[in-house]
Amino acid sequence: AENATNNDNVGTPIATTGTPTGFSITAGNTNTTFAIDNNGQITVNDSTQIDFEITPTYSLTIQITKADAQTQTGTIAINIINIFENIITIASDQIKSTAALTDGVDGFDVLNGAREVVTTIIGAKTYALVTAFNDNAVQIIDITNPETPTAVAAITDDTNGFTALNGVQGITVTKIGAKTYALAAGLNDNAVQIIDITNPSSPIPVAAVTDNVDGFTGLLAVSGITTTTIGTKTYALAASYSDNAVQIIDITNPSSPTAVITLTDGTNGFTELAGANGITTTIIGTKTYALVAASAGHGVQIIDISNPIAPTPVVAISDDVNGFNKLHTANKITTTIIGTKTYALVASDLEDGIEIIDISNPSTPIAVAGVTDNSNGFTELRGARDVTTAKIGDKTYALVASERDNGAQIIDITNPNTPTPVAALADDLNGFTELAGAYGVTTTII
């Protein structure tokens, strides 16, 4: 059973003809989980390796040496009995709300329609940047002391040289040289704004790239944005909802960004970019991949971008195909490493849940688990909009922002095959007062 301890007997001694003088396990003993003595008794050697969810059955090849020096082999199957692990749930009132920031209060001027949030460290301080869809703006916040966050700057469209923040939604931060830059996706401007935030109190507009200008053809209703470094260059990848496309941009020189290539749904083997919304990148082995959540396509496109000027489609994952059943209106996507494997997590709005995918081999992704609101203890996933992960101690957690539940769900994904609910945070409960229409989520260590 899964709760076996070291030296526990697994079975009775092996029976054989003749006089046995020794026994050994020659195959099937993954990580030397079991041992066998000279009497043929099999025992548990390393109980930490016994996990039904990972290896439910062992097939051991046993070699028997007899007094006449002849050997005999046989195979023994050891079936692991599944033990239902206790689900550790943290009461929501044990999770502390450190502060609530409200638009129009205490100097926070541009939080109306807050959409997405990202954090960064500049000097000795930690900052959050929040996009405000209705304010067409970005709020920069000093969260070095999370209990007393302070408004640092408000960046507003059509003010002080900022021209691409109308309906701003996605945001990311990157460092190039000695400077820190924010890239914001202006959905209604069909554009990306590049901002120098090296001095967070005095952000500077560096450049704006607009759809159908200077070779940019994949920025119509741009929603998601991320960056990656490949070789000596830094690239931005923008997900265009209405162009059904991904625009790759060389931002190595942030003041002079250049269009590299546009990847469009239905062309060159790309089949899951309709309503491209969330986007992220990850490195697996020696290659760099982009993963795109396609809201209208109800799926995920995995792209090899190791050569950014000639990206190639690796695989398209579609809802209700090959065991994937939580990708309808796939909204946002993130990746994490657990053990030796790489996983993608997708938040799906109308599925009211998330899909966990093993992408360790990007060409053959595997549906690992689907989590849905109001099942198996999950109560804050209705309208799942965004997902992020965090490692705390020896565990990995997912945090999901759920727009229609006005809250957030915390999930233990340490064993991705059996995600478990840890806590549900709801607006106007236990001190949480700013979770109505929860849309974006991120974490940081301070």
Image (cartoon, rainbow, N blue to C red):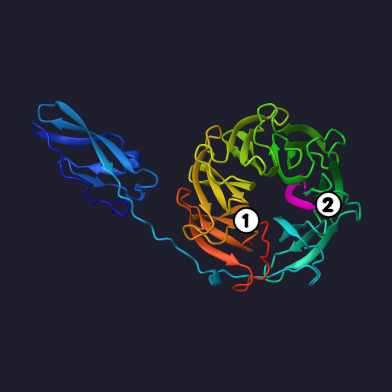
Instruction: Provide residue 47's location: percent of width, then percent of height.
Output: 32, 50
Quadrant for the C terminus in the image: bottom right
Residue 73 visible within the image:
yes
Q: Which residues are magenta?
A: 166-183
Placement of 372 over or under 317, stated as above or below: below
Left or right, 417 with respect to 295, comes to left
Q: CA distance from mark 1 to mark 2?
A: 25 Å
- 377 relative position to 75: left or right: right
Q: Amino acid at mark 1?
A: Gly
* Residue 266 sits above or below residue 144 on the image: above
**Position of 392 relative to 261 (above/below):** below
Residue type at the position of mark 2:
Leu
Secondary element under disc 2, as helix, strand or loop, is loop
Q: Is residue 129 visible?
A: no
Q: Which residue is mark 1?
A: 383
Magenta span dominant secondary structure: strand
Residue farthest to the left, as pictured: 18
Q: In x, y percent, where is residue 184? A: 78, 49
Depth check: 332 or 391 in front?
A: 332
Residue under the image location 76 percent in, 38 percent down = 243
Q: Residue at x 53, y 46 (%)?
A: 356
Q: Residue at x 63, y 37 (%)?
A: 301
Left or right side of 344 for 180 = right
Q: Quadrant of residue 177?
A: top right
Tag 2 or tag 1, which sits nearer the N-term? 2
* Residue that mark 2 sits on: 165
Q: Is 441 a magenta residue?
A: no
Residue 126 numbered tag:
none
Q: How many marks?
A: 2
Mark 2 closeness class: few <14, some 14–19, many ≥20 residues within 10 Å: many
**Element on which disc 1 rests:** loop
